[in-house]
Image (spheres, helix red, strand yellow):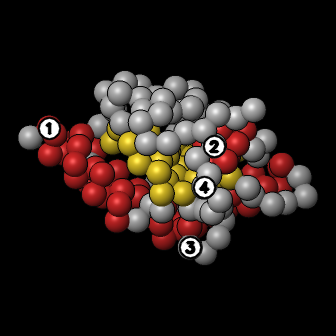
Amino acid sequence: MTSNISIGSPAPSINVQHWLRGDPLSNFQLGKIYILDFFSTCGYCGPVLSHLAQVQEEFSDMGVELIGVAANEEAETANEALAQVDKWVTKWLPNTKIRIGFDHSGEMAKHWLLASLSFHLPQAFIVGRDGSIAFIGDPDMPVLQTLAEYKGEQG
């Protein structure tokens, strides 16, 4: 059974079957801030992920790193789903420097989305410097507010 996660919970591990962009990452590094964005190849997810890539650049001096995870992608086979996601990422993030993972097995979705009772995409999580969940929700303005709070703690 999957345990529930909420604000303050330790972040579950990263478990994707394939990395489309960036170096593989299996664990969060303490001292860094991660924005983990679960997305699908829907029309709404593209602009959101592009915006989050800009947020990563804006807050990179604080050690912020964005990780996009393609979840719940529907296709006949895993290879077809992977090709769909790769084509979509190339369209929306042609020169991306962010990590993009592909969760075809649904393991990450189970340990993150279902465990947090999140049922729609896109869905963002912020993992704080201590490795715990600092934010769960729609990857819009609250993400910026949470990062601004971290920036205030530094200065």
Q: Residues within 10 Å of mark 1 (few under 14, many from 20)?
A: few
Q: Quadrant of residue 80?
A: bottom right
**Residue pointed to by mark 4:** 118
**Label 3 SS:** loop
Picture residue at 35% right of the left edge, 60% below the top: 142
**Residue pointed to by mark 3:** 44
Picture residue at 14% right of the left edge, 46% below the top: 152
Who is closer to the viewer here, 95 or 123?
Answer: 123
**Residue pointed to by mark 1:** 154
As measured in the structure, the alpha-carbon distance from the residue carrying label 2 to the one carrying label 4 is 8 Å
**Label 1 SS:** helix
As measured in the structure, the alpha-carbon distance from the residue carrying label 3 to the one carrying label 4 is 17 Å
Query: Is residue 136 found left or right of 149 in the rendered image?
Result: right
9 versus 134 height, above or below: above
**Residue pointed to by mark 2:** 115
Q: Work out whether mark 2 precedes mark 1 in sequence or the reverse, and give the earlier one.
A: 2
Disc 2 + disc 1, Cβ < 8 Å: no
Who is closer to the viewer here, 86 or 132?
Answer: 132
Picture residue at 50% right of the left edge, 42% below the top: 6
5 versus 44 height, above or below: above
Between marks 2 and 3 in the image, the one whose residue lies nearer the viewer: 2
Q: Give the residue type at disc 2.
A: Ala
Between marks 1 and 3 in the image, the one whose residue lies nearer the viewer: 1
Q: Quadrant of residue 5?
A: top right
